[in-house]
Amino acid sequence: MKSGKLNGRWTIILFILNLWTVCGAFSQNLDSKFNELQAVIGDEYNIRNKGKLLIVEGFREGKQVKIDEVNVFDLDVQTLNYSDVDGTVSVKCYSDLEGCVKQTLLFDKKKSYRKRLVFGVSGNDSGKIIEENLRSLLTEMVKTL
């Protein structure tokens, strides 16, 4: 009987260790996706997450001007696109939401809700690369979280 309890405990311990290892692998992959996107968008934006919340800090001339916060599960990744007309990469909220992106403008502390997350870009090549990297990051976040 002691042998059965011991084997059961080892099974639980091994299960927890395997789960921890798998979660660590997902976390490393997610970190690499953040790093890849950050390398492409440069100094104009800083991207991080807090759980399922994606936080995008916007900078102009080296000063932080805004913070966008959005639950990644509220973004419709199918709408993610690059517009060379606007010079933006954007992804819309699901249509049944009034506005899922909380935007705070820091110079006047004004908060508002937007229907899409937008990145200003310069050049067709960087826009397409940002679109690809953002799609990869959002897909990974949805799978991991």
Image (cartoon, helix red, strand yellow):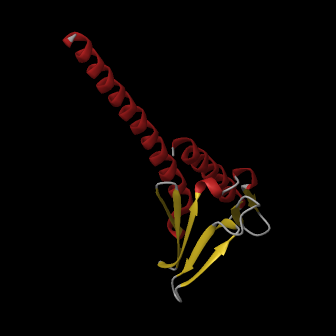
**Which residue is more in the foreground, 5 or 122?**
5
Q: Is residue 101 visible?
A: yes
Q: Is residue 122 visible?
A: no
Residue positioned most to the left: 2
Residue positioned most to the bottom: 108
Residue positioned most to the front: 1
The vertical placement of 134 against 69, above or below, is above
The vertical placement of 108 against 46, above or below, is below
Is residue 2 left or right of 39 when viewed as pictured? Answer: left
**Which residue is more in the foreground, 87 or 55?**
55
Q: Measuring from the top left, give residue 138's x and y in whole percent.
A: 60, 50
Residue at x-position 64% and y-position 52%: 129
Q: Measuring from the top left, give residue 48's x and y in whole percent.
A: 47, 59
The vertical placement of 104 against 36, above or below, is below
**Which residue is more in the foreground, 4 or 66?**
4
Is residue 42 left or right of 20 when viewed as pictured? Answer: right
The vertical placement of 9 against 130, above or below, is above
Residue at x-position 19% and y-position 13%: 2
Q: Measuring from the top left, give residue 85's x and y in whole percent.
A: 80, 67
Residue at x-position 75% and y-position 55%: 79
Number of disc labels: 0
Q: Measuring from the top left, give residue 145's x and y in whole percent.
A: 51, 46
Where's the N terminus, which quadrant?
Answer: top left
Q: Quadrant of residue 14?
A: top left
